[in-house]
């Protein structure tokens, strides 16, 4: 953990503290940093999935799922 002195927007800080349900500036900044990192990682993962979809990597799995679903339905008819 490092010690850093920064100027913060008091209104934005107060609103963030309220929304996050935390009571200290330290908790607020640390929670905001963790949230930002998690959000960026989710975006990166979504982009990778989209790229795989564009390359057609999921068509075979979708076709196999559909075939299995049809087979299950046919077994009950």
Image: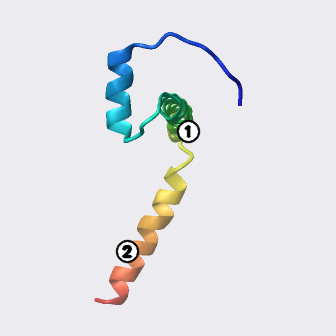
Q: Quadrant of residue 52?
A: top right
Please name whichever residue, 75 or 19, is drawn nearer the observer in this view of the structure. Answer: 19
Q: Is residue 65 above or below residue 47?
A: below
Q: Position of residue 19 (x, y in %)?
A: 32, 36
Q: Determine the residue located farthest toward the bottom in the rendered image.
A: 76
For mark 1, what is the residue? 45
Q: Position of residue 8 (x, y in %)?
A: 45, 14
- Residue at screen point 41% across, 79% down: 71
Q: Nearer the viewer's eye, disc 1 or disc 2? A: 1
Q: Position of residue 32 (x, y in %)?
A: 48, 31
Q: CA distance from mark 1 to mark 2?
A: 31 Å
Q: Left or right: 11 with respect to 43?
A: left
- Residue at screen point 51% across, 35% down: 27
| Disc 2: CA contacts within 10 A as few (<14), some (14-19) or many (>=20) | few
- Residue at screen point 53% across, 41% down: 49
Q: Secondary structure at mark 2?
A: helix
Q: Determine the residue located farthest toward the front in the rendered image.
A: 24
Q: Secondary structure at mark 1?
A: helix
For mark 2, what is the residue? 70
Q: Is residue 63 above or below residue 5?
A: below
Q: Determine the residue located farthest toward the top in the rendered image.
A: 7
């Amino acid at each position: 953990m490092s010690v850093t002195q920064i100027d913060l927007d008091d209104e934005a800080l107060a609103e963030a503290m309220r929304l996050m349900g935390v009571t200290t500036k330290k908790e607020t900044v640390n929670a905001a940093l963790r949230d930002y990192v998690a959000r960026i990682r989710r975006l990166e993962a979504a982009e990778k999935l989209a790229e795989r979809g564009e390359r057609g990597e999921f068509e075979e799995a979708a076709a196999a799922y559909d075939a299995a679903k049809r087979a299950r339905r046919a077994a009950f008819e």
